Image (tube, rainbow, N blue to C red):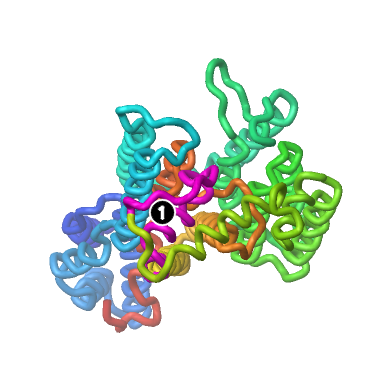
């Protein structure tokens, strides 16, 4: 019997769906109901009942369509993941507070004007970020998946252009598009995370040929990022690759091979690049060159050690350290609010990462799981590295504190990641199994 030809069954399904306000899930509900009803009807037919009797029994077993529809409406009611959004709002607000006082105290290396430009720009970027989160929350993230290959090769092309036509700015190649210069290398890990999630979520890592192809897909952008002289972005991207390979089911030898290759490349680059080697040695022993390579490490250590349990307050001006509004805003916050407040901040950061990881685990769509796993890796590396280098536990680099450090492009792309996360969370139950198929007499 063709289920679609039975008007009573289709009418029942339509009545159930009419109670579910989230229309994007109607197709999945309809499919599950069709499968369950058809199985139930066929089993009653096999017991010798007529078609009308089998349909009646199947509908009676399912129960009232209005009641089931209302239950499904509760299950599939779209709502944001408020804990992550509230935490990110707190981080942004803390960053705005820091920008205001850093500029007011003249800690930017130049005399501040009557208008707090840095603070105003940060507010504008925050508003733009909020609009991006809202727009992407309403957007169906599944529409991105078919374009994963286009995003991958488009990002690779932009990296190639950055290598050969980019202008060096602070040792990183910026891509010039007309009057605008973009640090495309910095945002490439996020774009590649989205692209590789769509490519690898159905990848068969058991086949040697596919394993080799998967490794090449990961390594090619890595080499281009390194060619743009951005070791920081390369490490973040490498963490994304290893995470996605693990979540997509790669065997240990696959991501161990990538890890060994990446580690060898990084060690080689540090040893053979004088300024990187100098920076690394300053991290190991800053006292060896206190007025040169180790000066910044010692200044940060002095700033942190003078903070106290409750800080020096926002009115106390610390000694000048370049980059207090960007890479070293954590040191400024520690100096101003003290170790107790910063301990709370670190706990909230851990909670933020844990919540991102939890959403990645709970979603039913494998593509969405990989996307969120990549985002979690990006945020985790950035948070850990920035805090580590401010506390003297990691080499100094250009990685900022997400949502807190000044940087328009960083804030906008972090907001885009949160927007996609919100879109995924909104649709987290779309592919959830709605009905048990363990027999005709199972309860819905």
Give the answer, above or below, for where 316 lies relative to 56.
above
- Left or right, residue 255 beside residue 360: right
Looking at the image, residue 173 lies above or below residue 360: above
Left-right relation of 3 to 298? left
| Relative depth, front residue between 131 and 408 | 408
Can residue 427 be seen here? The reply is no
Q: Position of residue 191 (x, y in %)?
A: 56, 43
The magenta-colored residue range is: 314-343
Residue 129 relative to residue 398: left or right:
left
Please say if 441 is above or below 358. Answer: below
Q: Position of residue 292 (x, y in %)?
A: 71, 47
Q: Is residue 315 within the magenta segment?
A: yes
Q: Is residue 423 magenta?
A: no
Give the tally of numbered discs: 1
**Residue hosting label 1:** 421
> Which residue is rendered at x = 40% and y = 81% of the image?
438
Tell me which residue sits at (69%, 49%) in the image. 291
Residue 423 position, x and y percent, is 37, 51
| Circle 1 crowding by C-alpha within 10 Å: few under 14, some 14–19, many from 20 | many
Q: Position of residue 164 (x, y in %)?
A: 74, 26
Q: Which quadrant of the structure image shows residue 75?
A: bottom left
Q: Quadrant of residue 41?
A: bottom left
Foreground residue among 217 and 23: 217
Q: Could you tell me which secondary element the residue under label 1 belongs to?
A: helix
Q: Nearer the viewer, residue 158 or 73?
A: 158
Which quarter of the rendered picture does the N terminus lie within? bottom left
Residue drawn at x 15%, y 71% as measured from the top left: 64
């Amino acid at each position: 019997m063709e289920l679609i030809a039975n008007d009573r069954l289709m009418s029942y399904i339509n009545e159930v769906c009419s109670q579910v306000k989230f229309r994007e899930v109607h197709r999945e509900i309809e499919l599950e109901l069709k499968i369950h009803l058809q199985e139930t009807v066929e089993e009653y037919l096999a017991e010798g009942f007529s078609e009308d009797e089998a349909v009646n029994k199947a509908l009676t077993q399912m129960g009232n369509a209005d009641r089931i529809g209302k239950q499904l409406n509760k299950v599939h009611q779209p709502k944001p993941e408020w804990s992550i959004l509230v935490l990110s709002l707190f981080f942004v607000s803390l960053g705005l507070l820091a920008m205001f006082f850093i500029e007011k105290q003249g800690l930017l290396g130049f005399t501040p004007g009557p208008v707090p430009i840095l603070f105003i720009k940060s507010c504008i970027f925050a508003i733009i970020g909020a609009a991006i989160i809202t727009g992407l929350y309403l957007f169906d993230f599944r529409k991105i998946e078919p374009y994963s290959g286009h995003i991958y090769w488009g990002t690779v092309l932009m990296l190639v252009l950055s290598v050969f036509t980019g202008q060096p700015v602070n040792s990183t190649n910026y891509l010039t598009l007309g009057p605008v210069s973009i640090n495309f290398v910095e945002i490439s890990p996020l774009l590649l995370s989205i692209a590789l999630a769509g490519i690898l979520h159905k990848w068969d890592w058991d086949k040697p040929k596919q394993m080799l192809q998967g490794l090449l897909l990961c390594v090619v952008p890595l080499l281009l990022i390194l060619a743009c002289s951005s070791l920081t972005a390369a490490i973040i991207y490498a963490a994304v690759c290893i995470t996605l390979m693990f979540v997509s089911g790669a065997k240990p030898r696959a991501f161990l091979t990538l890890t060994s290759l990446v580690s060898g490349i990084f060690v080689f680059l540090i040893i053979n690049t004088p300024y990187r080697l100098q920076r690394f040695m300053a991290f190991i022993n800053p006292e060896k060159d206190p007025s040169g390579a180790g000066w910044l490490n010692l200044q940060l250590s002095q700033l942190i050690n003078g903070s106290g349990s409750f800080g020096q307050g926002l009115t106390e001006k610390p000694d000048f350290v370049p980059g207090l509004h960007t890479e070293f805003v954590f040191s400024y916050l520690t100096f101003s609010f003290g170790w107790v407040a910063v301990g709370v901040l670190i706990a909230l950061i851990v909670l933020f990462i844990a919540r991102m990881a939890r959403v990645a685990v709970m979603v039913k769509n494998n593509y969405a799981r990989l996307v969120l796993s990549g985002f979690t890796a990006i945020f985790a590396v950035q948070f850990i590295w920035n805090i580590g280098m401010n506390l003297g536990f990691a080499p100094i680099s250009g990685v900022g504190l997400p949502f807190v450090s000044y940087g328009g492009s960083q804030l906008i792309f972090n907001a885009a990641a949160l927007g996609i996360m919100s879109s995924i969370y909104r649709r987290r139950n779309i592919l959830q199994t709605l009905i048990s198929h363990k027999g005709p007499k199972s309860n819905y």
